[in-house]
Each structure stands twice: as C-alpha cells, then as structure tokens.
Amino acid sequence: MKMDVKICGLKTAEAVEHAVARGASHAGFIFFPKSPRNIEPDDAGRLAERIRGRAKIVAVTVDADNDDLDEIVSALKPDILQLHGSEDPERVLTVKAIYGLPVMKALSIREASDLDRIDSYLGIVDRFLFDAKPPAGSELPGGNGVSFDWRLLDALDGSVDYMLSGGLNAENIGEALALTGARAVDTSSGVESAPGVKDLKLMDAFFDAVRRAEAALPRSGSKT
C-alpha cells in the first residue's frame, strides 16, 4: 500500500502543483491567523481547484467556530476537516453532523500519558494526526518544527489509524518510519526555507527520503 503523504500549509500554486506532482496524497490549507501559513478561504479554494481529484483537500482549523467553518467549507470544498485545537469528542461529533465530512483530529504528544486521550475519540474521528506538543512560548499548535519521541507509539493499538507529524523532514523521516511503521505522514515546516515559504528542493528531498524509507518497510506495514 502506497504511503499517504500530506504537505501542509500550502499557499502558492507552484507549491501545490509540485507537491501533487511528487505524489502528495493530501494537500493541507491552514486557516489560523497566528500561523505564517495562514491563507484566506477564497485563495485556498482557487488553489484547491488546481488539484481537486488528484489529492485530498484538507482544511486545517484550530478551535474554529461554526461561522468560520461555514466560510471555509463553502470556499474550499474540502475532502477532510483537520481539527488541530482543543476540540473535544462532542465538538467533533457536532462538526461531523453539520458538514458531513471526515474529521482528522490532531493530538499533541510529549509523553506516554498523552496517548490516553485517544480512547475518548475512538469511533468518532476518522483518523488521528499525532503532532509534537509546541515548545514553551509558541502560539502555534503545530508547524513548530519539533518532534516527539516516536518510540511512545510502540504502545499504540495497531488498529488506530493515524498520520505521523511533528518536525518531519528529509533527514529524519527514515528513522521515524523505521521506528513507527507509520503508513501516513505529514510535513509543513520540514519542507520550508523560512516559516510559511515552501521550498521545492526540500520538498523533493522529503519525497525522495519517504520513498526510500517506504521501500525498506515490511510489506505489511507492521513495525520492525
């Protein structure tokens, strides 16, 4: 099974087209004003139309209210909503009921106990995204370029569907995949030359590293 690769924080036609040409299965657009990757819904919608049908369009929000989500969903027409804030299971259910879209819920990981939160979302979210907890002082819930201890995922039930995130880049993706056996990965800052500025050469290096690591994984995708 080919690995899912999500390039997140896309803001330009060049980056969007290049990501999909290199094999991105998911294209993420961030709607969070504090982020250097923030994009207006109408602009994101125009970019998404360039790749619709070739990659899944993901709307990334942080504790967005219904008015904001209405605008985003109307303009972007996403395939998936990624909730990257403190949304509890009840909020996830509400969002799914209103918009009828799959939800990927981001959980921030630093220590083993952070994985305990998974249980309350099981059967509610369609996929998890495991990101590193932000460093002290950061206002961004993700995109901080930091990783967590991937060995913590050894305790994870194999049936949990997740996308691995948090500081992934061409240099560390091989180790991350070897340790976790993850079948879906997400990067944003790892393919940037500056916050919010996608670098096509770094993107190429990331995809090349993913494919090398993917080829080395067991066919079953199980952990080594």
Image (cartoon, rainbow, N blue to C red):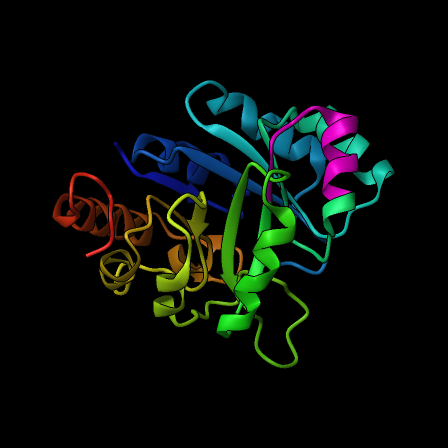
Image coordinates of residue 139 in percent, x first then y, are: 68, 69
- In the rendered image, the vertical position of residue 203 relative to residue 3, given as above or below: below
Question: What type of secondary structure mainly makes up the magenta span?
Answer: helix
Image coordinates of residue 119 in percent, x first then y, are: 59, 53
Identify which residue is drawn at 53% across, 63% down. Answer: 115
Residue 37 visible in image: no
Image coordinates of residue 173 in percent, x first then y, are: 28, 58
Identify which residue is drawn at 72% across, 41% down. Answer: 92
- The image quadrant of residue 3 is top left
Indicate whether residue 39 is drawn in magenta: no
Q: For this view, does 25 lie left or right of residue 35? A: left
Q: Residue furthest left?
A: 216
Image coordinates of residue 9 in percent, x first then y, are: 54, 48
Which residue range is magenta in the image?
91-104
Q: Quadrant of the C terminus?
A: bottom left
Q: For this view, does 90 lie left or right of residue 101? A: right
Residue 101 visible in image: yes
Total labels: the figure holds 0
Identify which residue is drawn at 56% across, 68% down. Answer: 114
Q: Nearer the viewer, residue 161 or 40?
A: 161
Q: For this view, does 16 lie left or right of residue 63? A: left
Q: Quadrant of the N terminus?
A: top left
- The image quadrant of residue 91 is top right
- In the rendered image, the vertical position of residue 112 relative to residue 4, given as above or below: below
Q: Residue furthest top?
A: 53
- In the rendered image, the vertical position of residue 116 relative to residue 201, given as above or below: below
Indicate whether residue 96 is drawn in magenta: yes
Q: Residue furthest right?
A: 67
